[in-house]
Image (cartoon, rainbow, N blue to C red):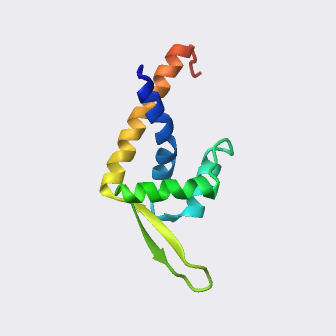
Amino acid sequence: MSDTGDVAALKKGTAELLVLAQLESRARHGYEIGQRITARGAGAVSFQPASLYPVLYRLERRGLIAGRWVEKPGQRRRRYYRLTTEGRRALAERRRTWRSFIQAVRRAAGVDYA
C-alpha cells in the first residue's frame, strides 16, 4: 500500500471492518456490537453510539448488513443486524487488506513478533 488514497480508504474502512467482524457469528444489536468491540479491543478501541450508528446505517444502505426490529418481553425494542452474503465477502476482503497492511508496517518499522 503505497498510495495515500489506499491509506485513507483503510482508515475509513476500519470502523466498518470492526462492525462487520462482530456480526460474523450471529446477529447483534448496536449496543452489543459496541460493547464487543470495546471488550475484544481490550479497551483500546471503542465506539460511542453517536459514531457507531452512522456506520451501521451506512453498511445497511450498502447491503452489507441487514437489520430487523425485535421485541422481547420485558425488554425494549432493538434493531438486530446480521451480515448479508455480500457483507461476508466484504469482511473477508477487508481482513485480507488489513493483513497486508499490517505486514507492510511491520516490515517497514522493523517490528518482529517473538
Residue 24 in sight from this viewpoint: no
Q: Nearer the viewer, residue 7 or 39?
A: 7
Residue 50 in sight from this viewpoint: yes
> Could you say which quadrant of the image residue 72 lies in?
bottom right
Indicate the quadrant containing the N terminus: top left, top right, bottom left or bottom right: top left
Give the residue drawn at x 49%, y 40%: 12
Indicate the quadrant containing the C terminus: top left, top right, bottom left or bottom right: top right
Return the x and y of residue 61 as percentages of the image width and height: 38, 59
Q: Nearer the viewer, residue 37 or 2?
A: 2
Return the x and y of residue 102 as percentages of the image width and height: 49, 27
Return the x and y of residue 91 as percentages of the image width and height: 39, 46
All told, the count of numbered labels is 0
Give the residue drawn at x 59%, y 50%: 37
Return the x and y of residue 21 as percentages of the image width and height: 47, 50
Residue 48 located left or right of residue 85: right
Give the residue drawn at x 46%, y 41%: 13
Residue that protrudes farthest toward the right in the picture: 43
Give the residue drawn at x 45%, y 64%: 81
